[in-house]
Amino acid sequence: MVDQRYYRQGKSWEDDTHRRLRRSRTFAWLLTGVFGAIALLSLVALVLLFPLKQYEPYMVAVDKTTGHLEIARALKPGDLSQDEAVTAANIVRYIRARETYDPRMIKSNFDLAQLYSTGAAADDLVREFTPSNPNSRDKRYGMDTTIAVTVKSVSFLNRTTATVRLSTEEKRQNTTRHEHWVAVIKFRYTSTPLKNEYRFDNPLGFQVTEYRRDQESLPDAAPADRTVQ
């Protein structure tokens, strides 16, 4: 006669097996539901972000003289911070005052450049315009020369340094000379009180501490005369 305990143990083993299978099946469905929900949320997020995607056309400009490449994009809010925009404007104003030469405006340009200069930049500026300097600007160019400045770009290397690409057009009597330059400018903003008359030209206390200008390419050569035979 078969022992009844054998049947009870067999039934208990079968119940345990079915119970484990049900747990495994429940856990598998739970994982499937979680991953399905994550996939669905990802798809919804992708659909919501799709209208934000846009294609921005741009133009690549090549400087024929220096070969410098510059990408020109349409301006829009947020491309340039207010601080950078103000600083770029101050830098351009400083370079125009310092590099422009017009016998009729020497004093006004010097005064403005001096207002924006301090430290080594101020020392170099004073040396450039000192009458006792035999190589001063007025002695080099005299009364029959003008130099016009065109600023091409301003790029910020960090919060206190910028590089500027510029060109100059020197006109002397019947000749014109074009030169291309790269300037490195170190600057700061000072809280030192200024006179009210200076506040109109420099309300934020912008100061150039160092200024170095290097030639980017050789001066444009005048076209040579050619004889056609």
Image: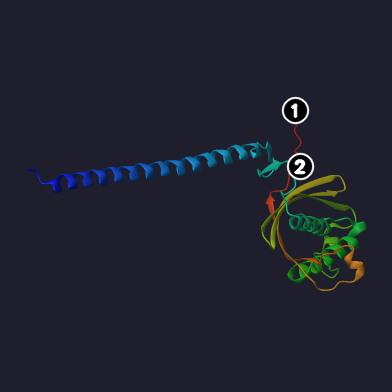
The quarter of the displayed image where residue 182 is located: bottom right
Q: Is residue 196 above or below residue 28?
A: below
Q: Residue at x 50, y 43 (%)?
A: 38
Q: Is residue 5 above or below residue 224?
A: below
For label 1, the crowd category at 10 Å Cα-Cα, with few meaning under 14, some 14 to 19 and many 20 or more, is few
Q: Residue at x 83, y 45 (%)?
A: 175
- Percent x, y for residue 173? 88, 48
Q: Answer yes or no: do the residues labelled 1 and 2 have beta carbons within 8 Å?
A: no
The quarter of the displayed image where residue 51 is located: top right
Taking the view exactly as shown, the residue that stands out farthest to the bottom is 192
Residue 197 as seen in the image, left or right of residue 188: right
Seen from the viewer's position, the closer of residues 57 and 97 is 57
Amino acid type shown at disc 1: Val
C-alpha span from label 1 to label 2? 19 Å
Q: Residue at x 79, y 55 (%)?
A: 89
User: Which residue was labeled with disc 2?
Assistant: 222
For label 2, the crowd category at 10 Å Cα-Cα, with few meaning under 14, some 14 to 19 and many 20 or more, is few
Where is the N terminus found, in terms of image quarters?
A: top left
Mark nearer the N terminus (1 vs 2): 2
- Percent x, y for residue 103? 90, 57
Seen from the viewer's position, the closer of residues 185 and 53 is 53
Where is the C terminus found, in terms of image quarters?
A: top right
Disc number lying in front (1 or 2): 2
Q: Residue at x 21, y 44 (%)?
A: 11
Seen from the viewer's position, the closer of residues 4 and 133 is 4
Amino acid type shown at disc 2: Ala
Residue 94 as seen in the image, left or right of residue 219: right
Residue 156 as seen in the image, left or right of residue 175: left
User: Which residue was labeled with disc 1?
Assistant: 228
